[in-house]
Image (tube, rainbow, N blue to C red):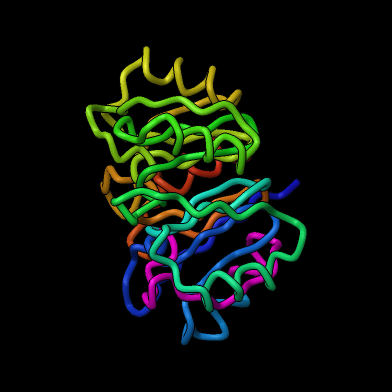
Amino acid sequence: MTFNVAKMQVFGNSNVGVYIFANDKIALVPPDMEQKDKQLIEDVLGVDVYEVTIMGTRLIGVLVAGNNNGLLVPSTITEGELQTLKEALGNSMNIGVVPSSNNAIGNLVAANSHGALVYPGLDNSTTKLISDVLGVEVAKRAISGISTVGAVIAVTDIGGLSHPDTGDDELEFLKDLFKVPFKTGTINFGVSFIKTGLVVNNRGAIVGANTSGPEIARIQMVFSGL
């Protein structure tokens, strides 16, 4: 299967992962995104695109996390926004409202269909909720000394990419948790926080416009299973 990678900016910004969430079923994007960009997301990732806000903001990728089984949203989401999500997803995915004082759920959780890694400071009841919604084993641990693990890891059911300072023992841990091979890398010409500039699923990837050729080649290798 062809794994396509496309460059994009969102509102003139190369941090595409800050604004977009995607899995193998849907992509969530902010309102007012250009139609050509929404079409590109549909074509590259092979998913339906839905316009939403979370907490009245455009920062969907920062505020939402999940896998193909479920979606995690902050407790500060409005009733109207939650209803919009429920209508968009139907019965295809669970939705879990995470009772954390940190609203940036996208920075706290990295997940695929086999496992989830979460911010080490989350309490056990929140960790259990995440496990129940996503249907996977959950581990708590910092990576490369960074506790906001959702910002430094991108993972699908094919492969994973982590912060360039991730050690060999940490890569082995990630491989065991997510059940896919892991490598280190960067995005947007040397940015270490992978998820800020990358939206990826099993079919393709959207990367920030500043991403270099070697970075794209590594993304294609990691997430196409080559």
Q: Up-down: is 163 above or below 42?
A: above
Task: Name the one closer to the observer, 104 or 215.
Answer: 104
Q: Is residue 69 left or right of residue 73?
A: right
Residue in the picture at 56% in, 78% down: 51
Seen as rendered, the residue at the extreme left is 145
The spot of residue 197 in percent (x, y) is 38, 56
Residue in the picture at 37% in, 18% down: 170
Residue in the picture at 43% in, 60% down: 61
Q: Is residue 86 left or right of residue 196?
A: right
Residue in the picture at 47% in, 64% down: 20
Q: Is residue 60 magenta?
A: yes
Residue 196 shows in the view: yes
Tell me the quarter of the picture where residue 76 sits: bottom left
Tell me the quarter of the picture where residue 88 sits: bottom right
Task: Name the one closer to the observer, 163 or 121.
Answer: 121
Task: Name the one closer to the observer, 186 or 107.
Answer: 107
Q: Which residues are magenta?
A: 40-61
Q: Is residue 81 magenta?
A: no
How many discs mark residues in the rendered view?
0
